[in-house]
Image: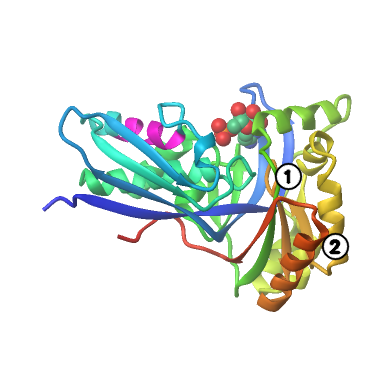
Amino acid sequence: MAPTSVIVRVPAKVNLQLSVGPLRKDGYHELATVFHAVSLSDEVKASYAEPGAGITLTISGEGADHLPVDETNLAYRAAMLLAARAEIDADVTMHLNKGIPVAGGMAGGSADAAGALVACDALWRLGTDRDDLMDLAAELGSDVPFALHGGTAVGTGRGEKLMSALARGSFHWVFALADGGLSTPAVYGECDRLRDGVEVPDPYVSDLLMQGLRAGDAVILGKALSNDLQAAAISLRPSLSQVLETGDDLGALGGIVSGSGPTCAFLARDHEHALDIAVGLTSAGVCRTVKTATSPAHGAKVVG
Ligand code: C5P
């Protein structure tokens, strides 16, 4: 019997390294990035809808009222795309429960799209194979394939070409969430502006970072964190420097802007240390709120 509803949990990501190469002719930048899934997550519920009902989308959780519920929402587009490829009508009632900061540089929208693909695939009993789901994910956005993949992976191309990376152990994080988001295209645009006239080298993955991951060594990993979009995010949101400095003063093993920001990610030694950093950031009053998380986390997964 077909399920009447499917719940999928999908993780947020942090780019442990985001090396941004030259601007391509198609408007994207060539990347070499190390994606890492963390335990902040969204849940996507897809429920049966009568034939002809179309797609209904509702959203709850932090920041939900800022998100569209029509075809401009990536989860909505994911359901439409999957149905079109399978040549069926897209009839589904979808609900997103947000635990990933909205427009925070942690790929929350991409996570919802990946969740919608997996949830609708199960609800509609399509049995789409993994590679085809990955291709659909890449069509929806550069970060969507990783939300399906989870764990740790090196992303190349515009970020959509993935190779699993070897990582040992688990890590403890603190995320400092800002008021309001930053637009990804605006941050890439600012990066281009700051680099105007500068020869941009090809993107690369740091050996030290891969070594830290292979050894499960948070101290090495903390030293190797890097993000080429950080200067651009700070240029658009100067208060982020203060957040990063505060995390550093609190003894974080490393701190970076997550993706295109404005969330800042801090690596801690262990759970206790993460709590100390979280308390310190909160009392310094440099961010809207803080969240702690562990990593690596699973990719999009049916949980109910
Ligand atoms: O692929 P996605 O739709 O998530 O990308 C959003 C925007 O981010 C793109 O329109 C582009 O401006 C920028 N981007 C980029 N290079 C990448 C990925 C994204 O310039 N590799």
Q: Position of residue 282 (x, y in %)?
A: 75, 61
Residue 30 percent location from the top left of the image: 67, 35
Name the residue rendered at 73%, 70% in the picture.
268
Relative placement, left or right, of 231 versus 146 is right
Amino acid type at image mark 2: Asp
Percent x, y of residue 214: 65, 70
Distance from disc 1 to disc 2, alpha carbons, whole Å, reads 22 Å
Image quarter hosting the C terminus? bottom left
Query: Does residue 273 lie above or below 47 as drawn?
Result: below
Residue 28 appears in the rendering:
no
In the image, residue 30 lies in the stretch drawn in magenta:
no
Asked if 80 appears above or below 41 in the picture, the reply is: above
Give the residue drawn at x 82%, y 54%. Answer: 244
Query: Seen from this angle, which residue lies furthest left?
Result: 1
Question: Which residue carries the number 2 mark?
Answer: 248
Q: Is ligand 1 less than 8 Å from the beta carbon at label 2? A: no
Q: Which residue corresponds to the image point at 55% horizontal and 43% vertical from the top-left?
A: 63
Specify few, some or many for label 1: CA neighbours under 10 Å numbering under 14, 14-19, or 20 or more. many
- In front: mark 1 or mark 2? 2
Read off the residue under disc 1.
19
- Judged from the image, the quadrant occupied by ligand 1 is top right
Work out which residue is located at the far top of the displayed protein and give it: 25
- On the picture, is 293 further left or further right than 242? left
